[in-house]
Amino acid sequence: MFFTVLLLFHSGSVEAQRICRCSGSGQLTFFCEWYEAGFPNPGVNHGFIHTDDYGETISFYDTTFKYFSNLTGDRSLGLIYGVNSNIQRSYDNGANWDTTLYNHNISYTLFFEGNQAGELFLFNDYDHNLYQSIDSGASFQLISSLVPHCNGRLVAGSQPGVLLGIDTSRRFFRSYDNGQTFEYIQFPDEIQNLVENTNSNYTFTITAGAVAEEVYVGVTKSNGEVNVYQSLNHGSTFSYKSTFPYYNYDQLKYIAGRESNEFYAIRFESVYFTYDPSIITYDLQISYSSDGGATFNTYSHLLYNELIAGEMPLPSVPSISLSPNPATDAVWLRDIPTGEVVTAIEISNLSGQSVFNYNCKSAVLHGQSLQVNLPPTLAAGCYVVKVMGGNRVVGREKFMIVK
């Protein structure tokens, strides 16, 4: 199972058009931007974050010189699409991209997947034109000029010909013939009352489910919380599933997976360090539900801008090791508080005299480790190692070298 995640790092937001599900259960993709302060590519760069286990673990693909304004997945194994002025395809969930570019000179505001392998849609919210491709983006045909103005809240259902959306009057609509005709459905009172108490036209978000007639609608309330509702009959009725607090996160987005009741909520926040504004951490939380959003398993990832840029690789356990140490083996410092930014390692003898300093580029230790090789010139004896976070000691340990 494969999951790829799409995030906009530099501004600290997640854009709905840049999150897509891939071909199998547990698979999502996020396009991201991050800020890199130094060599070799200062400024804003681009890439993908991906996981193959519902968000529990993640990894990164660097695509520094590739930019996508929209992203969508496909039911074909490993196939996703990125689009800016051209449509480009990846057959390995974003790790590499086909050099073939498809430019159809179609003005569009929304790019989204269909319900069959190789089916894609381009939609222009201004002229109501909907274009369909059934050959993985190689060609498109105009199939409707009647789609309601919907501010991008349009998805393909899980059955051929089905389109579902919410128009700018905040009405739910559906089509069973790819946009040739539409019918409107009144939201239930529970949802309608929330709508009437919220002024924003962007109150609603929508995502199609994986099985016949499944669709999710999110309603942002006036206090910033988001209520999620599920329908199993193309919007004829809805049932309440869960509420997400705002938590001061820059964005909260969600998307349905490939299996029935598979549902994700993604939260993202950026943090800038005052002593060095070039250091940015990104708090990513991926919540996975297998019961339609009623309950969730949440996986948290603390990311670091220069780690993403490939300058500071961090291993896998929350500790710092010092080696070689013939007395016992490597010394492991395991009590460093989660999230500390380590700036230096200082080693002194028992009299307090400094004998070794290791000035490391700041590394966020969050389920990570850092290995420091001791100089062979250190004499046998007892030492104290201090782990520094700026001007503070964030970890301390004694160790012995025997020669």
Image: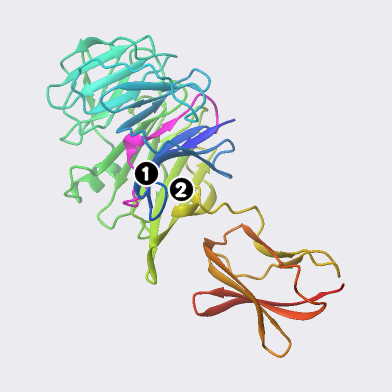
Residue extending farthest bottom:
351
User: Does residue 323 appear left or right of residue 131 in this picture?
Assistant: right
Observer-nearest residue: 291 or 46?
A: 46
**Mark 2 touches mark 1? (CB < 8 Å):** yes
Can you identify the residue that label 1 sits on?
Answer: 45
Q: What amino acid is labelled 2 in the image?
A: Ala
Q: Is residue 83 visible?
A: yes
Indicate the secondary structure of the residue bearing disc 2. loop
Q: Position of residue 108 (x, y in %)?
A: 21, 24
- Residue 370, by quadrant, is bottom right
Q: Position of residue 231 (x, y in %)?
A: 39, 31
Can you identify the residue that label 2 sits on?
Answer: 309
Spatial CA distance of label 2 from label 1 is 8 Å
Q: How is the image coloured?
A: rainbow
| First reached walking from the N terminus: tag 2 or tag 1 | 1
Label 1 crowd bin: few (<14), some (14–19), many (20+), radius 10 Å: many
Q: Is 324 placed above or below 203 here?
A: below
Q: Is 94 placed above or below 386 here?
A: above
Indicate the secondary structure of the residue bearing disc 1. strand
Q: Is residue 227 visible?
A: no
Observer-nearest residue: 125 or 238?
A: 125
Give the prevailing secondary structure in the magenta stretch.
loop
- Report the span colored magenta: 8-26
- Residue 230, by quadrant, is top left
Which quarter of the rendering shows the N terminus? top right
- Residue 238, by quadrant, is top left
Q: In the rendered structure, does residue 71 fall within the stretch colored magenta?
A: no
Q: What amino acid is labelled 1 in the image?
A: Asn
User: Does residue 115 appear left or right of residue 365 in this picture?
Assistant: left
Q: Position of residue 341 (x, y in %)?
A: 51, 67
| Total count of labels | 2
